[in-house]
Amino acid sequence: MALMQYSEFTKRRKNIWRNLILFLAVLGPGIITGSVDNDAGGITTYSIAGAMYGYNLLWTMIPAFIVLVVVQEMNARMGIVSGKGLADLIRENAGVKITFFIFVGLLIADIGNTTTEFAGVAGSMQVFDISKYISVPVAAVLVWWLVVKGTYKFSERVFLIFSAFLLVYVVSAIMGKPHWHDIGQAMIKPDIKYNKEYLAVVIGIIGTTIAPWMQFYMQSAVIEKGLKITDYKYTLWDVIIGSVITVVVAFFIIIACASTLHINGIVINEAKDAAMALKPIAGDLASITFAFGLFIASIFSATILPVATAFYVCEAFGFEAGIDKKWKEAPQFYWLFTFIIILGAAIILIPNAPLILITLWSQVANGLLLPVVLLCMILLVNKKEVMGEYVNKTWQNVIGWATIIILIGLSVTLLVTSFL
């Protein structure tokens, strides 16, 4: 009897280790895609939310988490089952003309988004008294080298390290000595306001959680990693853990700014302002930590975003693409990636470049394109010709369509408020 129990225990332990090894092998796409949410624009949005409304907007982290998990799970499942990227599937099912207009719009928006990421690099380094004429070119070369000279496996490891570094915002928040009782109250009984400024920030928080290009990157990453349907349960955990990390980082950015800037009535316009303002209130370490987090997030997103853009544009028009391919195997992919990096960095180096205008119009473009991409995605994930037996279940469609309708509503509202 004792021998049988020991044998059963040994078997269970081996299964645990086997599952852990399999999970670590699958780990990557979900965590990386989720973490890229916390880019320069995201950190700016969370910082402004904390500075303006204190802890009152922490409740938005709950719907943000749900949205992230639902959309990324559908992306991952579609990539695993079909073995094709989202761009490839859209071209096959919607035709070349519609695909052309969608992806030209996405390309323009992503050039603007990449410019915003390099603005984050410049701003974070200014906290350390480093000129943008040094930080931006160095960052651009580093980003280019990582993708062009690296392999997917190497790049993924670097991206995962970047994701882990974003947790420095937890340290920055604790340095601000937050009031945990007030935080609990804000989560349970939020003081929701019904004015356009409050609504705009709520839209910004939910909207920064999901961007059109992220859907293409997630699906392409799953394919490039070579995941199969047998890996699905581990991929699902990857998506969930990535979403948790994303929301935790956002949560503590809001807390850091609420605990320091809001209670002192300090108004900010961008994430760099938050890092500078923290110095006299919470000390040098809090300020340095916040700026370092902004730098990591910006350079991380400045790498992923152009890669994703080059990948889905090439995929949509039938060109070879992928970090694991050599330049001569995928010249269109690498030339487009290089072009986006050079253009995004060059715009930042222009004296008095209209960065706020660039950010606004890239956000408007994202708002216009997001409903189109999500509609394509939900229709494709329900096609038996594409998904076979792995189409959405009824409850998944209910959640999926509700998520998409809400996101479309937020996008339309965001467009209206942006123009107003």
Image (cartoon, rainbow, N blue to C red):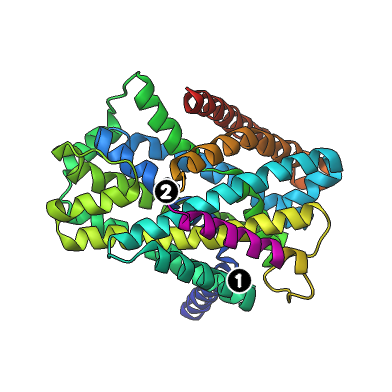
On the image, the x and y values in percent for residue 176 come to: 17, 51
Q: Is residue 3 left or right of residue 134?
A: right
Disc 1 is placed on an element classified as: helix
Residue identified by numbered label 1 = 147
- Disc 2 marks a residue whose amino acid type is Asn
Who is closer to the viewer here, 208 or 149? 149
Q: Is residue 378 above or below residue 175?
A: above
- Disc 1 marks a residue whose amino acid type is Val
Residue identified by numbered label 2 = 352
Q: Nearer the viewer, mark 2 or mark 1?
A: 2
On the image, the x and y values in percent for residue 169 come to: 31, 56
**Mark closer to the chain start, 2 or 1:** 1
Determine the residue positioned at 79% across, 42% down: 99
Determine the residue positioned at 77% across, 69% down: 330
Magenta-tinted stretch:
334-352
Is there any visible trace of residue 56 in the rendered image? yes
Mark 2 crowd level (few <14, some 14–19, many ≥20, 10 Å Cα): few
